[in-house]
Image (tube, rainbow, N blue to C red):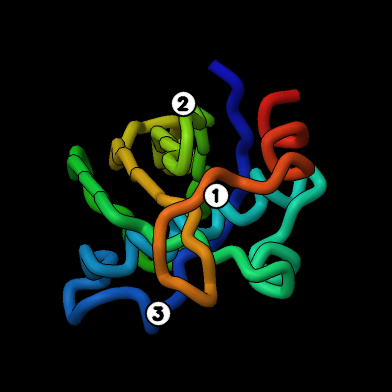
């Protein structure tokens, strides 16, 4: 399964009083991974939206194994799982600097026509770049 890694450091604002990353912030980490995976493929959300295509998350599952803490350098591994019809799926793993697995996740996104709000197959140029 093809993957892409990116690192980010945990900021104080992403943690609670105990210095542990608030669970809701993990969705943003996954977006970082997914967005940069797309950029590596020559695509951007901005470009999609300018071409009338939205890509909302319709399902998100996360399993927390260990906490990420303030000032940790985490690695977000994004795995392209599949793209069929209007759907695109990703798996994720988040690790700390020691190599401990902190979180696993899955997301399902759907290509949506910006004007109609209805699901759509991705434009050909998108499918060609995704499936390379």
Q: Earlier in the sequence, mark 3 or mark 2?
A: 3
Count residues near mark 2 (Cα–Cα under 10 Å), then give few for <14, some for 14-19, many for 20+: some
Q: Return the residue nearer the eye: 32 or 128.
A: 128
Q: Which mark is drawn over residue 81? A: 2
**Residue at 40% from the left image edge and 79% from the top image edge:** 12
Q: Please tell me whether mark 3 or mark 2 is closer to you in this view.
A: 2
Q: Which mark is drawn over residue 109? A: none
Count residues near mark 1 (Cα–Cα under 10 Å), then give few for <14, some for 14-19, many for 20+: many
**Residue at 33% from the left image edge and 32% from the top image edge:** 101
**Residue at 24% from the left image edge and 68% from the top image edge:** 24
CA gap between label 3 and label 2 equals 32 Å
Q: Please tell me whether mark 3 or mark 1 is closer to you in this view.
A: 1
Callout 3 touching callout 1 (CB < 8 Å)? no
Count residues near mark 3 (Cα–Cα under 10 Å), then give few for <14, some for 14-19, many for 20+: some
CA gap between label 3 and label 1 equals 23 Å
CA gap between label 2 and label 1 equals 12 Å
**Label 2: which secondary element:** strand
Instruction: Estimate the x, y position of residue 117 in percent, counting from the top left.
Output: 41, 70
Q: Which residue is mark 1?
A: 34
């Amino acid at each position: 399964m093809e993957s892409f890694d990116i690192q980010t450091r945990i900021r104080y604002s992403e943690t609670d009083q105990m210095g542990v990353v608030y669970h809701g912030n993990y969705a943003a980490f996954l977006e970082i991974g997914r967005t940069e995976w797309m950029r590596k493929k020559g695509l951007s959300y901005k470009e999609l939206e300018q071409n009338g295509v939205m890509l909302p998350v319709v399902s998100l599952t996360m399993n927390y194994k260990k906490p990420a803490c303030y000032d940790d350098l985490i690695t977000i591994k994004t795995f392209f799982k599949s793209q069929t019809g209007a759907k695109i799926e990703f798996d994720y793993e988040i690790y700390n600097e020691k190599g401990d697995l902190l979180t696993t996740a899955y997301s399902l996104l759907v290509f949506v026509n910006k004007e109609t709000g209805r699901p759509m197959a991705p434009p050909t140029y998108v499918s060609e770049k995704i499936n390379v």
